[in-house]
Amino acid sequence: MIGLLLLVAGLTFFSVFLLAKRFSLKQTRHMHAEHLKARVGLINNYVEEKQKEQACWWCAFGRLLGDSNEKELNKIRGLLVKGGYRDEKHLGAYFFIKYSFVLFVVLISLGLWTWFSIKTPIAILMPVISLLLPERVLIELGKRRLNRIKDALPDFLDMANICMNAGLSYLVAFKRVTEELKSMYPEICYEFNYLLEQIQIGVPRQEALKQFSERNPSDEIKELIQVLAQNEKLGTPIGAAINEFSRRLYQQRESKIEEKAAKTSAKMAIVILPFLMLPYFILMLGEKMVMLGRNW
């Protein structure tokens, strides 16, 4: 009887020990994951874990199909970054989509050449155009994204200036504005959030600002980076400089709107002129037709 009680007690103790050990390991993994998530995109271990979780076979296959020239790969990476695609898997996805599209166009051109007897130069030209088209589409996506960032920049800086007038530093103000405007202006909020995370893990501010300018090559962004870098070196108040810069951006936007409005009248005249001339010609011809009918 005593032995049975000791056996039950031992099994109970062993079961409780294993259960506690399991909960402890689970809590440790959770804390480790939260620690890595605090620096998402900037710690190699977290990036590797996310890539394992989000790995797709067609991205890996596309990476094998891609160009092995490092210069060309860096060029495509730059275009992807400008388009807002930063993960390494996006490079493989680009090559997979590109060559799948080329194969699809080749099959269509062969079918048209076989059954509908289209001209041979046209059948050859179609795959060539499909080979160049994805890169042009990627460039156009980058331009549109950059235009959205430029349009959102004055509003972003205005809200940041309000936060700085309340006593926050410009980095903390940028962080607060990214949280407030990420649903309205996701592109520019992502860029500033990435900049702040770089500075947070120890990247020098000048280098982080330089990379920010390289990722978004526009005159407005370059001027903003020059303002921030100059104030960082001289130690002057940055709130007044950002306020003046945002006012200039608003003035440039107003001048562009006025210029477009001035051109609208000339463009509308070209559209309206045929509709105005048509009734005039009808009246002229109608009068002549009536006079001819009376003479007969």
Image: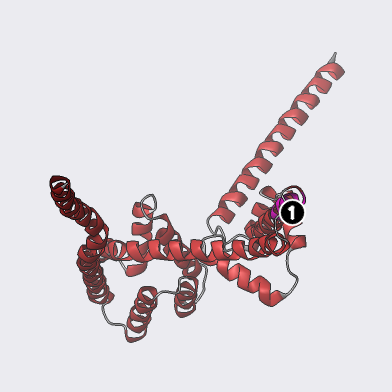
Report the residue at 52% width, 56% height from top.
38
Q: How is the image coloured?
A: secondary structure
Residue 48's x, y, as percent?
Answer: 68, 57
Quadrant including the N terminus:
top right
Amino acid bearing label 1: Trp
Q: Is residue 133 above or below residue 223?
A: above
Residue in the foreground of this view, choosing between 86 and 176: 86
Residue in the foreground of this view, choosing between 108 and 221: 108
> Is residue 109 inside the magenta stretch?
yes
Residue 82's x, y, as percent?
Answer: 51, 66
> Is residue 51 inside the magenta stretch?
no
Report the residue at 73% width, 53% height from top.
117
Residue 257's x, y, as percent?
Answer: 23, 65
Report the residue at 35% width, 54% height from top.
181
Report the residue at 25% width, 72% height from top.
252
Q: Residue furthest front?
A: 296
Residue in the foreground of this view, choosing between 31 and 199: 199
Q: Is residue 30 above or below residue 92?
A: above
Left or right, 165 with respect to 230, comes to left
Secondary structure, mark 1, is helix
Residue bounds of the magenta highlight: 105-114
Left or right, 238 with respect to 233, comes to left
Residue located beneath label 1 in the image: 113
Residue 27's x, y, as percent?
Answer: 62, 42
* Predominant SS along the magenta part: helix
Give the quadrant of residue 156: bottom left
Mark 1 crowd level (few <14, some 14–19, many ≥20, 10 Å Cα): some
